[in-house]
Structures are given as structure tokens and as C-alpha cells.
Image: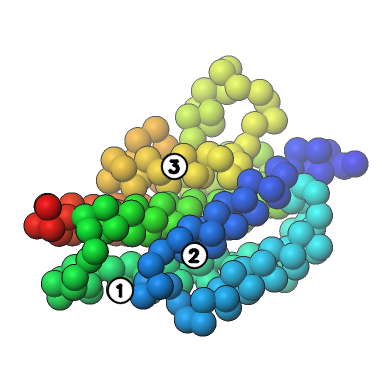
Amino acid sequence: MSTAGRRAERRWPMVTAALAAGALHELLPGSFRVAPHWIYPVFLVLFIVVLVAGDPGRIDRDRSWLRVTTGLMIGLITIVNAVSAARLVAGILSGRHFESAQQLFATGAIVWLINVITFALWFWDLDGGGAAARATRPSTACPAFVFPEMTLPEMTTSDWFPQFADYLTLSFNTATAFGPTDVSAIRRWAKLMMIGESLISLTLATLVVARAVNIL
């Protein structure tokens, strides 16, 4: 195995996150899911099968078609969750009847969690040219995000580079703190994406809590 192959990250964390997004969507009430309900998980699984077959094991093949397929899969997750979020917000603003505050909280929490996964996938896919590209370059080459490990080399190994768990943590912190925490965005697109995630998270939290209080 080449040095890049040994350094490359495994695919299962990304696959697990994508499958989790699909499974969480299926837990939503029927009116918040895309129809027909089977089509989304089928396409999601097809994308994953293609990616695993095209680059099995570690992610070390920097191919254009693999990047496009990954982007299409993340785009599908994004669009589907955007539809669910839009329906939730529209339902709250129009005074739609929810069975209980618990149902509203559960729906809002699922949409929020999928949103965290979605942004984590985008951050992971776009930073430094993608996972395969990061495996062949130094962690300081053209990054969009500066992680603590990059500025504290004495605290980590010499071959450290950001992997999916790091981007999931970044996305979760952005969604809960509504801004950067220990990771700095140094590219404009990265800053704008973090602003977008913070705004979506803040909007969902505010509307869901306010509506739930009224129901109670």
C-alpha cells in the first residue's frame, strides 16, 4: 500500500453519517417526508454502493467522477432535508396543528440533526479538495478550515490531517454555538457556509421552542 493509501481515511464514517441522515428522515411524520417515501433511501443507498465500489477501503482515489458522485449524494441529502425544514417552518408559521409538543420537538430535533450531518458532509467534501486530496497533501496545503492540531504540531502526530469526525464536530459546534469555536474558517465560502448553518439552526430552534410553548 502506498504512503497516501496508508494515510487516507476510511470510508465508513462518511457512509455511516449518510445512512444516519436517511434513517432519521424516515423517522419523520409522513407529511414531512418526500414522496414516494421509498425513493430517497433507494437513491441514497445506490450512491453509497457506487462510491464504495469505485473506491473501496480507504479514500485514496482522487477521481473526478467520484467527487461528482459524492457531491450529488450530499446534494440529495441537502435538498431532501431542506424540503422537510421548509415544511416544518411553514407549518409553524401557518399555525398548523401538531399532535403534541413532544411531536414538534422530535420533528425539529430530527431536522436539526440531519442539518448537522449535511453541513459536516459538505465541510468534509469541500475542504482542501476532498478526502482523497487531503490524503496526499500536507494538512496545511490550501485548507478552508484551520483546526487546533494544525497550529499545535507538538500535540499531535506528524501525519495528522482532518477526517470526517473533525468536520462533524465542527458542524455540531457551529449549530449549537451559532459561530466558530476552536476551528477557524479562512476561506470566504467556508465562512458563508458556517453563517448559513448558524442561521438555519437558530431559526429552527427559535420557531420550534416558541411553537411548543404555545402548545403546552
Q: Secondary structure at mark 3?
A: helix
**205 over 36 or under it: above or below:** above
Q: Residue beneath label 1, please?
A: 87
Q: Residues within 10 Å of mark 2 (few under 14, many from 20)?
A: some
Closer to the camera in the image, 86 or 94: 94
Q: Earlier in the sequence, mark 2 or mark 3?
A: 2
- Amino acid type at image mark 3: Leu
**Image quadrant where residue 7 sits:** top right
Which is closer to the viewer, label 1 or label 2?
2
Closer to the camera in the image, 142 or 159: 159
Residue drawn 38% across the image and 67% down it? 29
Residue drawn 39% across the image and 56% down it? 110
Q: Residue beneath label 3, please?
A: 170
Q: Which residue is the extreme one toward the front?
A: 99
- Amino acid type at image mark 2: Glu
- Asked whether residue 126 appears in the rendered view, the answer is no
Question: For residue 119, which numbered disc appears in the image?
Answer: none
Q: Which residue is the extreme one toward the top?
A: 154
Which is closer to the viewer, label 1 or label 3?
1
Which is closer to the viewer, label 2 or label 3?
2
Q: Residue beneath label 2, please?
A: 26
Q: Secondary structure at mark 2?
A: helix
Residue drawn 77% across the image and 47% down it? 58
Q: Is residue 155 left or right of residue 56?
A: left
Q: Is residue 177 left or right of residue 129?
A: left
Q: Residues within 10 Å of mark 1 (few under 14, many from 20)?
A: some
Residue 132 at x, y percent in the picture: 71, 52
- Amino acid type at image mark 1: Arg
**Image quadrant where residue 214 sits:** bottom left
